[in-house]
């Protein structure tokens, strides 16, 4: 049976709820039996005491001797019990047995007098002729014809009726309480099956879903505690749908962008193969080399952009402590040959000492490199590109300003979108990934890119704000 498996919720419910209930049921049944036996003992003790009093009333003095005339009909009028046997014994004031069973067991020492009845009476258990008895002992004062003292009357009976009454009460209590336990477990199981029915319906719906279906799940879980699961699933599906949509759009755009240089390469190779002129071959090879360089750069940018798009900000990489001034200067030095070949005046100004920021070192270096590549590409020969680092209002600002054509305010959002080429950049080859990659790196660092008008050089000013880190990184000693 499936509900008996260890991983079954119904099985665990029956185990953790049913086992304590069964133990409680057993304890209650035992307690009921003891209580019923005590109640039966008290009821039958009252009858025994009444029998002893009837015997005491039959005592009389005849010729100076105490006598007890106890016909069985007298005791039978009080004790009408067909399941038990009745015994009695009467002792005179000197302890001699004058009637009844001589060998009926005497009362042991240490038995306390009962406080339930206004009489000198004791009750105790004894064994007689292999049978367990309940014995009532009553002291009866005698003061007649010179006889003064206490006569002792013993009346005993077997315990079958007492135990039978206790068992009947036990069975009645066990059946009633057992029915309650069983009803509780059945109702708990039915309630759990009803609660889990929407879950099973949801499971069947998920099994029948096609792999590409990303529509929200219907509200099949009516309970407030489980409705949060549907909300969480739908939020996850929404994020997954947005991620897949971005990847599909990115794949389509990337395939379109890579198709152009590959077509150009094929055309250049065809031109070289169709010509017998070595000069034409050299020219085609040089063009193919330039196209390959552009394709390699485009592929690297595409891979970087895809990696950033898959990553959540601040989760996949731990932020370190980076000197922003050193990163900016290193980027300037690495781009000096490119600037001199154009030529463009590339320089750094601003903070001289270290400016520590919380950033990922490799991504920060890539951000600086892309900013400089973009500025050098669109700055005309003889122009100027300046990199600045300054600190204001508790944050560091990285500025890259050029003397190029700049970007109109209406086109700045488009400039930060991948594969969106502006109208004023048609003469420069590229895929429109430079600033888009910078924007994604900035978003990865939970900051933004600002495109402004350069007040000093008249071109574009790109500004990235980064949070300051108050202390430099710890140095490991040897």
Image (cartoon, rainbow, N blue to C red):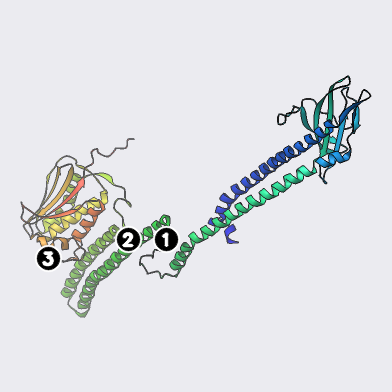
Do residues under tags 3 and 2 come within 8 Å of each other at their CB atoms? no
Q: Which mark is residue 239?
A: 2
Residue at image point 5% right, 52% down? 455
Q: Give the Cα separation between the discs numbered 3 and 2.
A: 35 Å
Q: Looking at the image, which is closer to me, 447 or 293? A: 447
Image side of residue 132 versus residue 382, left or right:
right
Do residues under tags 1 and 3 come within 8 Å of each other at their CB atoms? no
Position of residue 28 measured from the top left corner of the image (x, y, whole percent): 64, 44
Q: Secondary structure at mark 1?
A: loop
Q: Looking at the image, which is closer to me, 327 or 412? A: 412
Q: Quadrant of the N terminus?
A: bottom right
Q: Looking at the image, which is closer to me, 460 or 200? A: 200
Of circles 1 and 3, the one toward us is 1
Identify the residue position indicated by label 3 in the image.
425
Position of residue 310 measured from the top left corner of the image (x, y, whole percent): 31, 59
Vertical placement of 369 versus 43: above or below? below
Residue at image point 29% right, 37% down? 475
Q: Give the Cα separation between the discs numbered 1 and 3.
A: 57 Å
| Residue 8 visible (yes or no) | no
Tag 1 or tag 2, which sits nearer the N-term? 1
Tag 2 or tag 3, which sits nearer the N-term? 2
Vertical placement of 97 versus 290: above or below? above
| Residue 415 visible (yes or no) | yes
Vertical placement of 214 versus 335: above or below? below
Tag 3 or tag 1, which sits nearer the N-term? 1
Of circles 3 and 2, the one toward us is 2
Residue 304: image quadrant is bottom left
Of circles 2 and 1, the one toward us is 1
Q: Quadrant of the C terminus?
A: top left
Identify the residue position indicated by label 1 in the image.
222
């Amino acid at each position: 049976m499936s509900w008996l498996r260890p991983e079954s919720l119904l099985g665990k419910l029956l185990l953790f709820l049913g086992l304590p209930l069964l133990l409680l049921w057993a304890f209650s049944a035992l307690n009921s039996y003891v209580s019923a036996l005590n109640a039966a003992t008290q009821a039958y003790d009252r009858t025994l005491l009444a029998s002893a009093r009837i015997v005491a009333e039959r005592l009389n003095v005849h010729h100076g001797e105490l006598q007890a005339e106890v016909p069985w009909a007298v005791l039978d009028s009080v004790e009408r019990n067909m399941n038990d046997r009745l015994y009695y014994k009467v002792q005179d004031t000197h302890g001699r047995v004058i009637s009844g069973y001589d060998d009926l067991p005497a009362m042991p020492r240490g038995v306390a007098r009962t406080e339930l009845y206004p009489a000198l009476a004791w009750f105790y258990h004894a064994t007689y002729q292999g049978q367990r008895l309940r014995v009532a002992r009553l002291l009866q004062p005698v003061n007649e014809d010179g006889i003064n003292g206490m006569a002792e009357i013993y009346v005993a009976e077997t315990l079958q009726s007492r135990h039978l009454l206790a068992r009947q009460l036990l069975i009645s209590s066990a059946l009633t309480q057992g029915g309650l336990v069983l009803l509780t477990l059945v109702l708990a199981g039915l309630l759990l099956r009803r609660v889990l029915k929407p879950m099973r319906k949801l499971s069947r719906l998920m099994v029948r879903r096609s792999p590409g279906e990303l529509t929200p799940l219907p509200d099949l879980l009516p309970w407030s505690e489980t409705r949060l699961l549907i909300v969480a699933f739908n939020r996850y599906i929404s994020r997954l749908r947005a991620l897949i949509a971005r990847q599909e759009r990115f794949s389509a755009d990337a395939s379109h962008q890579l198709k152009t240089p590959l077509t150009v390469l094929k055309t250049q190779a065809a031109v070289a193969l169709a010509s017998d002129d070595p000069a034409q071959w050299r020219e085609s090879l040089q063009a193919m080399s330039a196209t390959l360089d552009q394709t390699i750069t485009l592929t690297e940018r595409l891979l970087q952009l895809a990696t950033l798009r898959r990553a959540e900000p601040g989760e996949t990489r731990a932020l370190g402590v980076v000197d922003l001034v050193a990163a900016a200067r290193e980027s300037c030095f690495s781009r000096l040959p490119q600037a001199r070949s154009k030529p463009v005046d590339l320089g750094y100004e601003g903070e001289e000492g270290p400016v520590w920021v919380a950033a990922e070192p490799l991504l920060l270096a890539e951000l600086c490199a892309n900013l400089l590549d973009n500025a050098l590409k669109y700055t005309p020969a003889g122009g100027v590109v300046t990199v600045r680092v300054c600190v204001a209002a508790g944050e560091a600002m990285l500025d890259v300003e050029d003397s190029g054509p700049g970007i109109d305010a209406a086109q700045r959002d488009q400039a930060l979108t991948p594969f969106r080429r502006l109208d004023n950049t048609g003469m420069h080859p590229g895929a429109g990934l430079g600033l888009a990659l910078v924007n994604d790196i900035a978003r990865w660092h939970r900051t933004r890119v600002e495109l402004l008008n350069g007040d000093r050089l008249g071109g574009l000013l790109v500004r990235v704000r980064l949070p300051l880190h108050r202390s430099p990184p710890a140095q490991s000693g040897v």
